[in-house]
């Protein structure tokens, strides 16, 4: 069995889908691994590192993809970018499938069996394959570091002979994996941390990290979580009440980090322009939902906006800002999943179509796109 790791073609993507460590483990499973020259450089992995781990290093994508049974990527490839792989080859990546019907149709037409890692079910067996969690963890950490750099003031309280420097007040909006890591990191830096989320289970998590929980805790709040652990879309009445509470709280904050996302939908708007204008000059907002339109009304994806002296940072691919760490975790996620697709007896690709992991993540097979993501006509 041949596993191909072509370089990412998006210049804004520094992560790589395999590391020398995972190459060694694929080799131990009986696989041949081919990595495109330069694929790992932006993540700190040299071609020699891959070669020493037992991978073949190909000069270009064509050489790497020739007769590949499995193609590992970070971002969704185009049909042209997987040309040369076997028909029916397993393409494993973050496919970003919502609203991408035509792109998925192209992969199906090219004969790819495409697996979307971000659709991995949140069950115990799949924890080691959860790319959303592994990458969000890094993004939450990086968001606090970026906020501290942009804030232009000290984060912890400092008592000096010249006077006392007050601790920064840091508000985390959305307490998923990214939010929890942001809380923990902000606390380690000495900030006064508070957080909010519509899911009732997060209150205990927030408080266990030493932060204050802020939310309208009514009956709707108590039912605000799906069975899969995601936030439900809330009613207009609840959102209005929560917005009023947040508005009064946010006016007193120095740093706000927003992380709220609902799968398949635009990011919910949590911070209005008026809320931004209520913050003091020099305050910072880091919007981790910028790629989905942003949680702040004034967010511009990929740019920093200044409104009344308040910086709104529309960060993109924050996990990629720590590419070596993010790639190491992502590659392990892929290894854990691909291992389930390999026969222990024959050492060949042997996909179990009845496996719940396969059912949840396989979006193209035998030239057909999963009905959930077919292009609407």
Image (cartoon, rainbow, N blue to C red):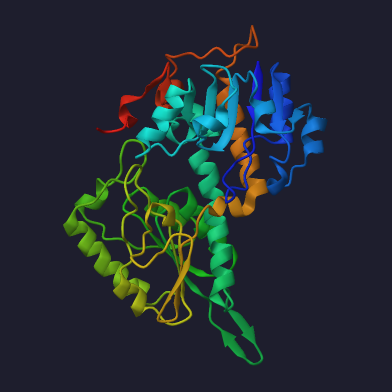
Instruction: Measuring from the top left, give residue 327's x and y in whole percent.
Output: 63, 42
**Residue 41 occupies quadrant:** top right
Residue at figure coordinates x 70%, y 31% from the top left: 35
Residue at figure coordinates x 31%, y 53% from the top left: 198
Instruction: Measuring from the top left, give residue 155's x and y in whole percent.
Output: 57, 74
Up the image or down, 132 lies above or below 247; here it is above
Q: Residue furthest top?
A: 345
Residue at figure coordinates x 69%, y 36% from the top left: 19
Q: Residue furthest left?
A: 237
Up the image or down, 73 lies above or below 275; here it is above
Drawn side of residue 204 relative to residue 372, left or right: right
Up the image or down, 206 lies above or below 62; here it is below
Task: Using the image as rendered, state which of residue 352 and residue 39 is in the foreground.
Answer: 39
**Residue 31 occupies quadrant:** top right
Q: In which quadrant of the rendered image does the C terminus lie?
A: top left
Q: Can residue 190 be seen?
A: no
Instruction: Measuring from the top left, give residue 100's x and y in whole percent.
Output: 38, 37
Residue at figure coordinates x 40%, y 81% from the top left: 308
Q: In which quadrant of the rendered image does the N terminus lie?
A: top right
Up the image or down, 164 lies above or below 97; here it is below
Instruction: Measuring from the top left, give residue 139's x and y in whole percent.
Output: 53, 53
Task: Using the image as rendered, state which of residue 102 and residue 20 is in the foreground.
Answer: 102
Drawn side of residue 317 relative to residue 345, left or right: left
Q: Can residue 322 be seen?
A: yes
């Amino acid at each position: 069995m041949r596993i191909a790791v072509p370089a990412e073609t998006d210049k804004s993507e520094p992560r790589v889908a395999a590391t020398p460590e995972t190459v060694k483990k694929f080799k131990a499973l009986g696989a041949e691994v081919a990595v495109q020259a330069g694929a790992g450089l932006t993540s700190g992995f040299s071609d020699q590192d891959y070669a020493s781990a037992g991978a073949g290093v190909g000069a270009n994508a064509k050489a790497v993809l020739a007769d590949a049974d499995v193609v590992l990527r970070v971002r969704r490839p185009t049909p042209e970018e997987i040309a040369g792989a076997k028909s029916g080859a397993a393409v494993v990546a973050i496919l970003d499938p919502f609203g991408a019907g035509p792109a998925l149709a192209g992969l199906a037409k090219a004969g790819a069996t495409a697996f979307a890692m971000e659709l991995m079910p949140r069950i115990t067996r799949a924890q080691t394959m959860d790319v959303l969690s592994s990458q969000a963890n890094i993004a939450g950490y990086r968001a606090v570091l970026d906020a501290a750099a942009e804030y232009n003031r000290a984060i912890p309280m400092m008592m000096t002979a010249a006077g006392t420097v007050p601790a920064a007040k840091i508000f985390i909006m959305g307490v998923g994996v990214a939010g929890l890591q942001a809380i923990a990191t902000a606390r380690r830096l000495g900030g006064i941390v508070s957080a909010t989320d519509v899911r009732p289970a997060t209150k205990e998590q927030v408080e266990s990290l030493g932060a204050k929980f802020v939310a309208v805790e009514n009956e709707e709040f108590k039912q605000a979580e799906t069975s899969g652990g995601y936030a439900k879309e809330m009613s207009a009445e609840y959102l209005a009440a929560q917005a009023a509470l947040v508005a009064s709280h946010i006016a007193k904050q120095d740093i706000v980090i927003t992380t709220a996302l609902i799968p398949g939908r635009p990011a919910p708007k949590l911070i209005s322009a008026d809320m931004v204008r209520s913050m003091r000059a020099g305050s910072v907002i880091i919007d981790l939902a910028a790629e989905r339109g942003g949680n702040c009304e004034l967010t511009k994806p990929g740019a920093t906006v200044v409104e009344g002296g308040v910086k709104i940072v529309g960060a993109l691919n924050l996990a990629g800002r720590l590419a070596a760490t993010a790639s190491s975790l992502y590659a392990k996620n892929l290894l854990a999943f691909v291992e389930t697709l390999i026969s222990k007896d024959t050492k060949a690709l042997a996909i179990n179509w009845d496996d719940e992991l396969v059912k949840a993540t396989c979006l193209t097979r035998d030239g057909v796109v999963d009905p959930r993501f077919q292009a609407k006509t």
